[in-house]
Image (tube, rainbow, N blue to C red):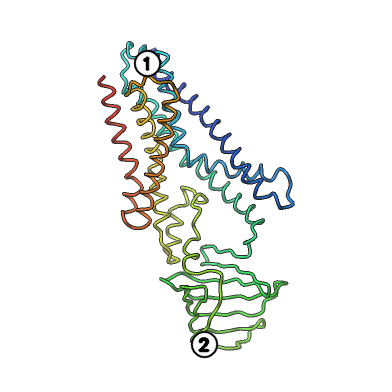
């Protein structure tokens, strides 16, 4: 068998082992940290002892998905450092394998992993987060106030001491909910009346309804053509627009449909578009992490112990995280186009890593 092929198989095998060990380490840390948070949440509730464990198992995979690029960075640094300090790197170079080839193999593996995670693992983590939120929502004190965007419109549920209310609107236009219907129920879920309005200005909690018609529980019209009508709600424009705060519940395969749905309902699609581009860029993000790891291990001649590299990896992770987050904020606030805000950090890291790898290969 060709010598270079044997070396490539060895690199794939060892790098895969390193990623696997690093994944186990971070997954265990994530479970421990999140388990304490779940125990703290349920401590005053009469629940089974195993529920915090179940909630942790449901939620941690989504955290794992989000931090996986940094797991790849740590894995890359650890792997390259291992073959460097064990003189395996020297043996490979003597066999005619260049530094570039040694970095390229783990890079290709990271891209393959990225594609697999986005297309196969992300839908699973999204489903788990949805399940997590449904279970935890049953114990939330503010469950009486819910809102959702569906194919049938915008739905809002509110509850007070006197009555329960379900509100439906066809879509959102600027500051107004259009074609509004308000169903009011008593504490035993018997309908009291129905309020229909052409629109509702929701700029404040005190909604202003236009062209209102009130219908009783038997279907009789009590009042109609009311030009101005006030309704006090627990939702305003800002809260209605923040319904999709947890984008982890949206899988990669559902993003385009969600964008179409938001457009139809009059919502901004920028956050969803940013998620789409970040998902498309995910494999290249992992690739950039491997290149960066190669630069800071094979491209530099630190004489210090492993602690130095660990500190470097942590500092790099913090810088990349805040750089990525800052770029995302610029996109959401329209300071930068969504595509640029999503891809710019990855392109910059990729360029820096590529230049560093080329320099290391020339040594």
Q: Quadrant of the N terminus?
A: top left
Neighbour class for label 2 at 10 Å: few (<14), some, many (≥20)? few
User: Measured along the vertical axis of the image, is residue 34 above or below residue 295?
Assistant: below
Question: Which of these two is toward me, 255 or 359?
Answer: 359
Q: Residue at x 67, y 83 (%)?
A: 218
Residue 191 lies left or right of residue 207; in this view the side is right
102 is higher (above) or lower (below) than 258: above
Q: Which residue is mark 2?
A: 226
Q: Report crowding for label 1: few under 14, some 14 to 19, many 20 or more residues within 10 A (C-alpha).
A: many
Indicate the quadrant containing the C terminus: top left, top right, bottom left or bottom right.
top left
Element on which disc 2 rests: strand
Residue 258, image x and y in percent? 46, 57
Q: Residue at image x 32%, y 16%?
A: 97
Q: Position of residue 202 (x, y in %)?
A: 48, 73
Q: Earlier in the sequence, mark 1 or mark 2?
A: 1
Q: Label 1 vs label 2: CA separation?
A: 81 Å
Quarter residue 92 falls in: top left
Q: Judge from the rendering whether residue 164 lies leftward or rightward of residue 270; answer left or right.
A: right
Count of numbered badges drawn on the protein: 2
Q: Position of residue 65 (x, y in %)?
A: 49, 40
SS of the residue under disc 1 = helix
**Image disc number at residue 73:** none
The image quadrant of residue 191 is: bottom right
Q: Please state which of the two labelled residues, at mark 1 or mark 2, is closer to the viewer.
A: 1
- In the depicted structure, whether residue 220 falls above or below residue 291: below
- The reply to whether dot 1 and dot 2 touch (C-beta < 8 Å) is no
At which x and y percent is residue 28?
A: 58, 34
Q: Residue at coordinates 48% horizontally, 73% vertically from top-left?
A: 204
Q: Which residue is mark 1?
A: 89
Looking at the picture, tell me which residue is in the foreground, 308 or 181. Answer: 308
């Amino acid at each position: 068998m060709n010598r270079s092929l044997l070396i490539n198989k060895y690199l794939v095998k060892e790098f895969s082992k390193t990623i696997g060990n690093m994944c186990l380490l971070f997954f265990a840390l994530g479970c421990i940290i999140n388990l304490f948070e779940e125990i703290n949440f349920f401590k005053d509730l009469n629940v089974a002892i195993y529920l915090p464990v179940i909630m942790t198992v449901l939620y941690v995979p989504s955290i794992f998905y989000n931090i996986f690029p940094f797991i790849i960075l740590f894995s890359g640094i650890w792997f390259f450092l291992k073959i460097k300090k064990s003189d395996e790197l020297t043996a490979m170079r003597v066999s005619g394998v260049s530094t570039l080839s040694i970095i390229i193999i783990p890079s290709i593996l990271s891209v393959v992993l990225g594609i697999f995670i986005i297309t196969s693992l992300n839908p699973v983590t999204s489903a788990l987060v949805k399940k997590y939120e449904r279970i935890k929502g049953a114990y939330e004190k503010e469950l009486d106030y819910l809102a959702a965007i569906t194919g049938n419109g915008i739905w809002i549920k509110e509850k007070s001491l006197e009555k329960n209310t379900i509100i439906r609107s066809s879509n959102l236009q600027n500051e107004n909910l259009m074609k509004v219907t308000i169903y009011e129920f008593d504490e035993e879920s018997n309908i009291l009346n129905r309020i229909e309005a052409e629109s509702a200005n929701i700029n404040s909690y005190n909604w202003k309804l236009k062209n209102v018609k009130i219908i009783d529980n038997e279907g009789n019209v009590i009042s109609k053509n009311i030009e101005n009508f006030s309704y006090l709600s627990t939702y305003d424009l800002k809260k209605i627009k923040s319904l999709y705060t947890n984008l982890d519940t949206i899988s990669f395969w559902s993003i385009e449909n969600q964008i179409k749905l938001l457009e139809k309902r009059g919502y901004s699609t920028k956050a969803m578009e940013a998620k789409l581009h970040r998902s498309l860029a995910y494999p290249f993000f992992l690739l950039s992490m491997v290149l960066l790891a190669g630069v800071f291990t094979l491209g530099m001649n630190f004489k210090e112990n492993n602690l130095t590299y660990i500190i470097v990896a942590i500092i790099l992770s913090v810088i990349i995280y805040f750089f990525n987050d800052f770029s995302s904020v610029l996109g959401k606030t329209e300071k930068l186009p969504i595509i640029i805000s999503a891809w710019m950090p990855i392109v910059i890291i990729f360029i820096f890593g590529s230049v560093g790898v080329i320099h290391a290969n020339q040594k």
